[in-house]
Amino acid sequence: MENFGERLHSARVMARLSMDQLVERLGGAVSKQSISKYERGLMKPLDGALLVRLSKALNVPVDYFLRDSTLSLEGVDFLIKAGLGSKEVASMIEQTRDQLERRFELEALLGIDFRFVNPLRGRRIASLEDVEAAAEKLRRDWGIGVMSPITRVFDLLEANGVRILELDVTGSLDGLSGLVQGVPVVLLKKNVPGDRKRFTVLDELGHLLLEFGSNLERKDIEKYCRAFAGAMLLPARALNKELGGNTRSRISLPELVHLKEHYGISIQAAMARIHSLGVVSHSARRRFDILVNVKKLKEQEPGEYPIEEKSTRFMKLIYRALAEGAISLSKASVLSRIPIDKLQQETVS
């Protein structure tokens, strides 16, 4: 219980609750003054009943309050620079801490190395041509070739050491990325369309892997990272094969829908990619932009990528640890936040 106060504060911040709001959720069973004393380490709970009440009020397991805080989040300054409100940033930091603590603990129990090697290290990006070359190199290094669609982007990144966390974010921000203890981490907003998730996570991968000169402005870096995401999802060679090698005066909407359903890229991102590679003229791009506005395609695009993108690595490791006897069922429940009875049903062979 040495870290109870710190853990209570973290759980409250993660839930975006003030002390007064927590008191209200607890039905007045604990005073604001007591909560303040708990968080400052001036007082500790005397019975387990309070821990259960706090657990339910803050939507965390009782074990959360008993766990040591071992993860330093000095590397999440990228959150603070994101232009979000202080309450939102604080919640995202604690959500990140909680998820990473559980993942790192599980990986340590399985003896998994935390180290990450950037395949693009030393490649300075100063042009769109550099971006294309970097995307081709990464595709080769990660074994997906230079033309094939990436079936599951999340699985690809996680298999190569990138941790993907989906957070409860109330703002308009789709994604952020940074290094935490040398580990590349991408944070994504939950409950957004799959094609947007795929593009966002690869955009953030660009921020993690690409190296830029100090003279580049932020807007240029953002442009290059978006181009990197497009190049990863829709390689130039594949695009030429799909649309023909010559410059086109028009691209039909059904062609763009096909690209979306086959390569998992939104029709708007696909058109931006097509235009940047010179496959269509400026006038064709303008006609497309008009079509988007007239048909309100920003609100609801036609077509759908058939494969759901979700982070699966953590649960795969949970099942592996159970199979190898590295953790007990109760420990698996604590780490995964899945009830023991449900885990039992899923692991019965």
Image (cartoon, rainbow, N blue to C red):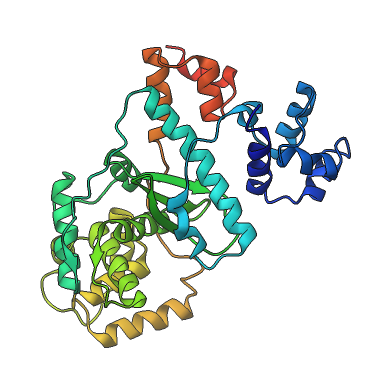
- Percent across and percent down for residue 241 are 13, 62
Q: Which quadrant of the figure has residue 240?
A: bottom left
Quadrant where the image shows the C terminus: top left
- Percent across and percent down for residue 32 are 84, 45
Residue depicted at 47% across the width and 47% down the height: 73
Q: Residue furthest left?
A: 245
Q: Residue furthest front?
A: 42
Report the side of 55 relative to 266 (left or right): right
Q: Which quadrant of the figure has residue 136?
A: bottom left
Residue depicted at 19% across the width and 55% down the height: 121
Report the side of 160 relative to 312 (left or right): left
Residue depicted at 63% across the width and 43% down the height: 10
Q: Between residues 69 and 303, which one lies in front from this camera angle?
A: 69
Reply above or below: 93 against 83: above
Q: Between residues 94 and 242, which one lies in front from this camera angle?
A: 94
Reply above or below: 106 against 143: above
- Percent across and percent down for residue 166 are 49, 47
Quadrant where the image shows the N terminus: top right
